[in-house]
Amino acid sequence: MQNPKSPIAAIAVGALSLCLSPIANGGVLVLKNGDRITGEISAIWDHEITIEPTYSDEFKVDSEVVA
């Protein structure tokens, strides 16, 4: 059983809260290096977050680089 205070659990909760953000059909990923990616988050699966910004095709971000 995984410890609920683990970094992966924190990332999952943070990413889910981004999905519920007040931005219509959108979210913001804040990366550990300070960058932000704004777009529609379509999936969170297997330590990857799939996001589609308005300026690019959909791509995946490794959850370990998300703050």
Image (cartoon, rainbow, N blue to C red):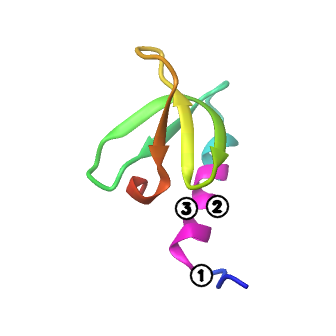
**Label 2 to label 1: alpha-carbon separation:** 11 Å
Task: Point out which mark residue 5 bears.
Answer: 1
Type of amino acid at the residue the image marks with label 2? Val
12 magenta-colored: yes
Q: Position of residue 44 (x, y in %)?
A: 64, 46
Q: Position of residue 12 (x, y in %)?
A: 62, 59
Tag 3–tag 2 contact (CB < 8 Å):
yes
- Looking at the picture, does residue 19 appear above or below residue 58? below
Of mark 2 and mark 1, the one earlier in the sequence is 1
- In this rendering, would 66 be left or right of 27? left
User: Which residue lies at the image location 65% right of the left edge and 35% below the top edge?
Assistant: 22
- Looking at the picture, does residue 56 appear above or below residue 18? above
Q: In the structure shown, which secondary structural element does the residue marked by tag 2 occupy?
A: helix
Type of amino acid at the residue the image marks with label 3? Ile
**Label 3 to label 2: alpha-carbon separation:** 5 Å
User: Which residue lies at the image location 48% right of the left edge and 22% below the top edge?
Assistant: 53
Task: Point out which mark residue 11 bears.
Answer: 3
Q: Which residue occupies the foreground of this view, 10 or 3?
A: 3
**Is any atom of residue 50 visible in this view?**
yes
Q: Which residue occupies the foreground of this view, 59 or 24?
A: 59
- In this rendering, would 3 be left or right of 67? right
Q: Quadrant of the C terminus?
A: bottom left
Q: How many marks?
A: 3
Q: Residues within 10 Å of mark 3 (few under 14, many from 20)?
A: some
Of mark 3 and mark 1, the one earlier in the sequence is 1
| Residue segment shown in magenta | 5-16
61 magenta-colored: no
Q: Residue furthest front?
A: 46
The rendered magenta stretch, by its main secondary structure, is classed as helix
Residue 24 lies in quadrant? top right
Type of amino acid at the residue the image marks with label 1? Lys
Task: Point out which mark residue 13 bears.
Answer: 2
